[in-house]
Image (tube, grey):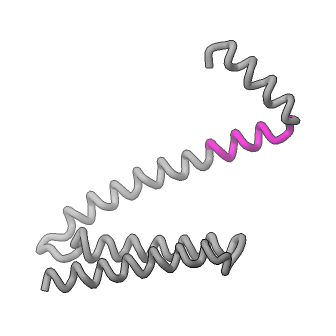
Amino acid sequence: MTLTKYIVGFVLSLLLTLTAFFLVENDLLSGGALIWTLGVLALVQMIVQLAYFLHLGDELRPRYKLASFSFMTGILLIIVVGSIWIMDNLNYNMMEMSPQQKTDYMNTQRDKGF
Protein backbone atom coordinates (compact mmCIF):
# COMPACT_ATOMS: atom_id res chain seq x y z
CA MET A 1 0.00 0.00 0.00
CA THR A 2 2.74 2.48 0.91
CA LEU A 3 4.82 1.79 -2.20
CA THR A 4 1.74 2.22 -4.38
CA LYS A 5 0.98 5.52 -2.68
CA TYR A 6 4.53 6.75 -3.25
CA ILE A 7 4.41 5.77 -6.92
CA VAL A 8 1.05 7.52 -7.45
CA GLY A 9 2.39 10.63 -5.70
CA PHE A 10 5.55 10.58 -7.80
CA VAL A 11 3.63 10.21 -11.06
CA LEU A 12 1.22 13.01 -10.14
CA SER A 13 4.10 15.30 -9.12
CA LEU A 14 5.94 14.52 -12.34
CA LEU A 15 2.84 15.22 -14.46
CA LEU A 16 2.19 18.53 -12.71
CA THR A 17 5.80 19.62 -13.08
CA LEU A 18 5.95 18.65 -16.75
CA THR A 19 2.64 20.39 -17.41
CA ALA A 20 3.96 23.63 -15.93
CA PHE A 21 7.20 23.30 -17.89
CA PHE A 22 5.32 22.56 -21.13
CA LEU A 23 3.06 25.60 -20.68
CA VAL A 24 5.98 27.95 -20.12
CA GLU A 25 8.34 26.46 -22.68
CA ASN A 26 5.84 26.44 -25.56
CA ASP A 27 4.23 29.84 -24.80
CA LEU A 28 0.75 28.34 -24.77
CA LEU A 29 -0.51 31.00 -22.36
CA SER A 30 0.72 34.50 -21.70
CA GLY A 31 0.40 37.18 -19.09
CA GLY A 32 -2.10 36.76 -16.29
CA ALA A 33 -3.51 33.48 -17.62
CA LEU A 34 -0.09 31.84 -17.38
CA ILE A 35 0.52 33.17 -13.88
CA TRP A 36 -2.88 31.97 -12.64
CA THR A 37 -2.44 28.56 -14.29
CA LEU A 38 1.01 28.12 -12.77
CA GLY A 39 -0.36 29.19 -9.38
CA VAL A 40 -3.13 26.58 -9.56
CA LEU A 41 -0.65 23.91 -10.66
CA ALA A 42 1.63 24.87 -7.75
CA LEU A 43 -1.27 24.63 -5.31
CA VAL A 44 -2.24 21.19 -6.62
CA GLN A 45 1.42 20.15 -6.44
CA MET A 46 1.54 21.26 -2.80
CA ILE A 47 -1.56 19.22 -1.98
CA VAL A 48 -0.10 16.16 -3.70
CA GLN A 49 3.16 16.55 -1.77
CA LEU A 50 1.33 16.93 1.53
CA ALA A 51 -0.98 13.99 0.96
CA TYR A 52 1.34 11.46 -0.64
CA PHE A 53 4.77 12.23 0.81
CA LEU A 54 4.25 14.06 4.09
CA HIS A 55 1.22 11.90 4.98
CA LEU A 56 -0.72 14.85 6.33
CA GLY A 57 -4.01 13.46 7.59
CA ASP A 58 -2.97 9.78 7.72
CA GLU A 59 -2.01 9.66 11.40
CA LEU A 60 -4.28 8.89 14.33
CA ARG A 61 -4.05 12.36 15.85
CA PRO A 62 -3.77 14.73 12.89
CA ARG A 63 -4.26 17.89 14.96
CA TYR A 64 -0.61 18.15 15.95
CA LYS A 65 0.68 17.96 12.40
CA LEU A 66 -2.10 20.22 11.18
CA ALA A 67 -1.31 22.81 13.84
CA SER A 68 2.40 22.80 13.00
CA PHE A 69 1.61 22.91 9.29
CA SER A 70 -0.75 25.86 9.82
CA PHE A 71 1.91 27.73 11.81
CA MET A 72 4.52 27.01 9.13
CA THR A 73 2.13 28.21 6.41
CA GLY A 74 1.46 31.43 8.31
CA ILE A 75 5.17 32.16 8.73
CA LEU A 76 5.82 31.36 5.08
CA LEU A 77 3.01 33.69 3.98
CA ILE A 78 4.37 36.48 6.15
CA ILE A 79 7.82 36.08 4.59
CA VAL A 80 6.58 35.85 0.99
CA VAL A 81 3.96 38.60 1.19
CA GLY A 82 6.33 40.85 3.15
CA SER A 83 9.08 40.36 0.59
CA ILE A 84 6.74 41.14 -2.30
CA TRP A 85 5.43 44.19 -0.45
CA ILE A 86 8.95 45.50 0.17
CA MET A 87 10.02 44.90 -3.44
CA ASP A 88 6.88 46.60 -4.75
CA ASN A 89 7.49 49.58 -2.46
CA LEU A 90 11.09 49.85 -3.63
CA ASN A 91 9.99 49.59 -7.26
CA TYR A 92 7.36 52.27 -6.76
CA ASN A 93 9.81 54.65 -5.11
CA MET A 94 12.48 54.13 -7.77
CA MET A 95 10.28 54.28 -10.88
CA GLU A 96 10.10 58.09 -11.00
CA MET A 97 13.83 58.33 -11.61
CA SER A 98 15.67 58.16 -14.91
CA PRO A 99 18.37 55.47 -15.25
CA GLN A 100 21.07 58.08 -14.62
CA GLN A 101 19.28 59.32 -11.49
CA LYS A 102 19.01 55.74 -10.22
CA THR A 103 22.72 55.21 -10.78
CA ASP A 104 23.57 58.47 -9.00
CA TYR A 105 21.28 57.59 -6.10
CA MET A 106 22.78 54.12 -5.76
CA ASN A 107 26.29 55.59 -5.79
CA THR A 108 25.46 58.11 -3.06
CA GLN A 109 23.92 55.38 -0.91
CA ARG A 110 26.95 53.15 -1.42
CA ASP A 111 29.21 55.99 -0.30
CA LYS A 112 27.16 56.29 2.91
CA GLY A 113 27.88 52.67 3.72
CA PHE A 114 24.43 51.22 3.08
Q: Position of residue 12 (x, y in %)?
A: 36, 82
Position of 2 relative to 107 (above/below): below
At a point 62% along the width and 19% down the height, the residue shown is 114
> Looking at the magenta stretch, what is its main secondary structure?
helix
Whether the magenta-drawn stretch holds residue 52 is answered as no
Whether the magenta-drawn stretch holds residue 87 is answered as yes
Position of 93 relative to 69 (above/below): above
Residue 90, quarter of picture: top right
Q: Position of residue 2 (x, y in %)?
A: 14, 81
Residue 97, quarter of picture: top right
Q: Position of residue 93 (x, y in %)?
A: 77, 38
Residue situated in front as seen by the camera: 5 or 72: 5
Q: Name, please, the residue furthest toward the front.
A: 26
At a point 55% along the width and 46% down the height, the residue shown is 82
| Drawn side of residue 74 relative to residue 93, left or right | left
Q: Name, please, the residue furthest toward the top.
A: 112
At a point 39% along the width and 70% down the height, the residue shown is 46
| Drawn side of residue 103 relative to residue 69, left or right | right
First to last magenta residue range:
86-97
